[in-house]
Image: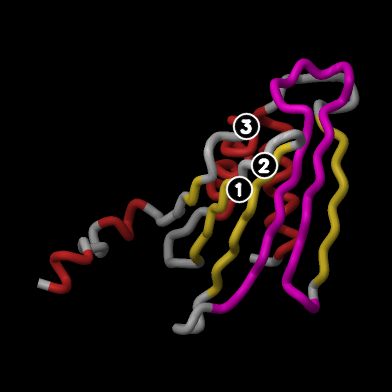
């Protein structure tokens, strides 16, 4: 999926999961640099929206892994917080991009927690993942 398409999906998911406010709950600004494979969605809560989060940003980086597959790394930040959440999204068979965008939007709306890293792997991949101890043993 292209950066601009994916960041648009995240923005749609944020609007869908936010309270209904005339004019929308968020003021947003998108920036995409296709040459560098980077995108940013900056968000500010509208004064009329009663949201627990004042604003923040979602930074996307797209890159190819060693095996040639695509990975998107979403870094979530919030206004007045030093916490960051990093969510990698791997382009694997069966990946639902809209669901991945919705999960990122949901993580943003949950607000800052301690710095975390969450990996999004489709449920179909869980059966193929072995613990490192099992592989090394």
| Residue ID for mark 2 | 82
Element at label 3: loop
Within 10 angstroms of label 1, few (less than 14), some, or many (20 or more) residues? many
Element at label 1: helix
Q: Is residue 44 magenta?
A: yes
| Residue ID for mark 3 | 111
Q: Going from the N terminus, do you reach mark 2 or mark 3 first?
A: 2
Give left or right: position of 63 versus 26.
left
Q: Which residues are magenta?
A: 35-64
Q: Compute the Cα span from label 1 to label 3.
A: 16 Å
Q: Compute the Cα span from label 1 to label 2.
A: 23 Å
Within 10 angstroms of label 2, few (less than 14), some, or many (20 or more) residues? few
Question: Residue 94, located in which quarter of the rendered image?
Answer: bottom left
**What residue is rendered at 59% in x and 30% in y?**
110
Q: Relative to 124, is 66 above or below? A: below
Picture coordinates of residue 75, whole percent (x, y): 64, 53
Element at label 2: loop
Foreground disc of the pair 1, 3: 3
Q: Relative to 132, is 41 above or below? A: above
| Residue ID for mark 1 | 101
Type of secondary structure dominating the magenta stretch: strand
Picture coordinates of residue 112, whole percent (x, y): 61, 34
């Amino acid at each position: 999926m292209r950066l601009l398409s994916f960041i648009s999906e995240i923005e749609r998911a944020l609007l869908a999961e936010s309270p209904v406010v005339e004019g929308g709950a968020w003021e947003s600004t998108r920036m995409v640099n296709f040459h560098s494979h980077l995108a940013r969605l900056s968000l500010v809560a509208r004064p009329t929206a009663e949201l627990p989060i004042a604003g923040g940003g979602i930074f996307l980086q797209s890159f190819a892994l060693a095996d040639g597959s695509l990975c998107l790394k979403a870094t979530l930040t919030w206004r007045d917080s030093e916490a960051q959440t990093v969510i990698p999204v791997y382009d694997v068979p069966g990946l639902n991009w809209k669901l991945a965008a919705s999960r990122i939007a949901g993580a943003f709306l949950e607000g800052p927690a301690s710095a975390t890293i969450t990996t999004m792997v489709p449920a179909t991949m869980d059966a193929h993942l072995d613990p490192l101890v099992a592989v090394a043993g």
